Image: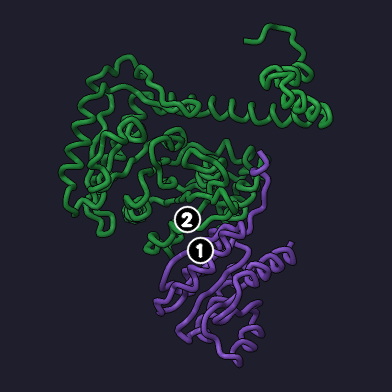
């Protein structure tokens, strides 16, 4: 009865680009599930177009991008641009993977609101998402 | 596609037909139980989609089969809506929805809309709001709607009440022990599919399913209040010899083998539903059961709302002290809100 009027946090966890390392994405997906969120996991080798289309159809509040190929400076701007053209400006984006320090600043300037590197604590990611979503409302 | 000649469409229908973002947001409101008015407005514009349910045990290839069927329907020019249901964790309330992984072929096609749903505590293989989400896709003028259930075992038969044509997917190696499952989910199949038919054992699984079907009488089966019911054929002219005969199809979803034949079975089934009058019968039963479910839920909420929590607490105390039994306590509460004028059954 009470489960009907519940606002679940919906998160897309996507792996854009060509690297095949999905362990990090799976760990994060699992942690978010355990934090009570609905995680849409789309698998490996997604194009920016696929990521944004899935985010739109699933009406997620947050997109998590796992990129270990080093291509984040190419993929992330494209995804952010497609999000704007599709009216997803209010959706928060975070990036996980191997991101050099100087790129972290650049990504944040583009509009990425969180970057989590190796050794990041899943509790911090959960906290970041909860805060991002409550800021939207 | 008669949108242009119907200027009096309700605003919500105009919105979801012209904007995928609006459709997506409506589906969220439906899932959150906040779209009663929108659902009421779009309801008259539903009823034209062919709703196909896909169910079966985990790992039989439901998502891949949905992907293959959707691709097939796109080659015929029909638009496809997909609702894929995965389970919610009973511990955290969270879910990992991974059905899209197998549906990547469909991305970039504006004639396809895929939505993942978590069961959110529902146990019948669908979420509480799946039927309403399907209705919104129907009103958004998707012509074929595929519903993929959670990986189902024996009793997740809710799909048969939600879909017009129900496919039950089996795979070789899982179906050897047909005995174990034949009292359950196989009974709701309008079409049985042996997927992964290129694997060893496909023939024996198919034979076992055909043998099982030969044992039964051909009657109409409908799900009513979660119960599988057998009813006489709707049209008296349809006797046992012309009733629907559940076919067993073989497919290899990942390379498209057998998909065209499966689609033909599905078309034949829809034609049968129309010609036999079963379509109307099934819909009536579905509507009745939906209304009684709503009635139950609404009355319960009203009753709990009217009940003084202190009074409820006092009754619970009485029961815990064994001074009152639970049934009598419940009746005391009900009689307060609904004084007995006529005898209750």
Q: Chain of mark 2?
A: B
Which quadrant of the structure image shows residue B149?
top left
Q: Position of residue B126 (x, y in %)?
A: 49, 42
Chain that the image shows in green: B
Lateral position of residue B138 relative to residue B178, left or right:
right
Read off the residue under disc 2. B114
Chain that the image shows in purple: A
> Measuring 72% from the left and 65% from the top, which residue is drawn there?
A136
Q: Could you say whether the residue bearing mark 2 is in a helix, strand or loop?
A: strand
Read off the residue under disc 1. A54
Q: Are marks 2 and 1 on the same chain?
A: no
| Residue positioned most to the bottom | A102
Considering the image in quadrants, where does the C terminus of chain B appear?
top right
Q: Position of residue B98 (x, y in %)?
A: 45, 59
Dot 2, how many residues are within 10 Å of its Cα: few (below 14), some (14-19), or many (20+)? many
**Disc 2/disc 1 C-alpha distance (Å):** 8 Å
- Circles 2 and 1, Cβ within 8 Å, touching? The answer is yes
Q: Position of residue B248 (x, y in %)?
A: 23, 39
Question: How does the figure colour the protein chain or chains?
Answer: by chain
In the image, residue B308 sits, relative to residue A130, either above or below, namely: above
Q: Position of residue B4 (x, y in %)?
A: 54, 49
In-front residue for pair B244/B76: B244
Dot 1, how many residues are within 10 Å of its Cα: few (below 14), some (14-19), or many (20+)? many
Q: Chain of mark 1?
A: A
In-front residue for pair B273/B12: B273
Asked whether residue A69 is in view, the answer is yes
């Amino acid at each position: 009865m009470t489960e009907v009027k519940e606002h679940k946090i919906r998160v897309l966890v996507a792996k854009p680009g060509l690297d095949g390392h999905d362990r990090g994405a799976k760990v994060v997906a699992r942690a978010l599930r355990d934090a009570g969120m609905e995680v849409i996991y789309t698998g490996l080798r997604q194009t920016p177009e696929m990521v944004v289309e899935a985010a739109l159809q699933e009406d997620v509040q947050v997109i998590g991008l796992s990129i270990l190929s080093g291509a984040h400076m190419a993929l992330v701007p494209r995804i952010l641009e497609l999000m704007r053209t599709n009216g997803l400006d209010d959706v928060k984006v975070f990036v996980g993977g191997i991101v050099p320090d100087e790129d972290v600043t650049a990504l944040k300037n583009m509009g990425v609101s969180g970057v989590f590197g190796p050794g990041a604590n899943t509790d911090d990611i959960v906290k970041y998402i909860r805060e991002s979503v409550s800021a939207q409302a | 596609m008669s949108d242009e000649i119907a200027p009096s469409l309700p605003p919500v229908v105009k919105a979801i037909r012209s904007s995928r973002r609006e459709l997506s947001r409506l589906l969220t409101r439906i899932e959150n139980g906040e779209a009663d008015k929108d659902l009421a407005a779009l309801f008259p514009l539903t009823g034209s989609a062919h709703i196909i349910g896909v169910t079966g045990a985990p790992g039989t290839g439901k998502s891949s089969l949905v992907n293959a069927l959707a691709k097939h329907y796109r080659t015929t020019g029909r638009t496809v809506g997909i609702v894929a249901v995965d389970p919610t964790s009973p511990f955290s309330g969270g879910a990992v929805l991974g059905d899209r992984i197998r549906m990547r072929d469909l991305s970039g096609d504006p004639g396809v809309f895929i939505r993942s749903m978590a069961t959110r505590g529902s146990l019948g293989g669908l979420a509480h709001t799946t039927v309403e989400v399907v209705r919104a896709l129907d009103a958004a003028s998707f012509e074929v709607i595929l519903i993929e259930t959670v990986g189902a075992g024996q009793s997740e038969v809710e799909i048969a009440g939600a879909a017009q044509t129900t496919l039950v997917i089996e795979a070789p190696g899982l179906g050897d022990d047909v005995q174990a499952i034949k009292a359950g989910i196989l009974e709701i199949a309008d079409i049985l599919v042996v997927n992964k038919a290129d694997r060893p054992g496909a023939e024996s699984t198919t034979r076992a399913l055909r043998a099982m079907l030969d044992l039964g009488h051909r009657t109409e089966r409908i799900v009513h209040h979660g119960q599988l019911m057998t009813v006489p054929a709707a049209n008296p002219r349809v006797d046992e010899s012309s009733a629907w005969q559940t076919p067993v199809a073989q497919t290899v979803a990942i390379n498209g083998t057998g998909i065209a034949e499966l689609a033909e079975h599905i078309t034949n089934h829809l034609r049968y539903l129309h010609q036999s009058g079963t379509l109307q019968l099934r819909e009536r039963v579905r509507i009745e059961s939906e209304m009684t479910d709503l009635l139950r839920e609404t009355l319960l909420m009203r009753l709990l709302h009217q009940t003084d929590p202190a009074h409820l607490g006092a009754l619970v105390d009485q029961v815990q002290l064994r001074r009152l039994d639970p049934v009598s306590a419940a009746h005391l509460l009900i009689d307060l809100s609904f004084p007995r004028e006529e005898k209750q059954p």
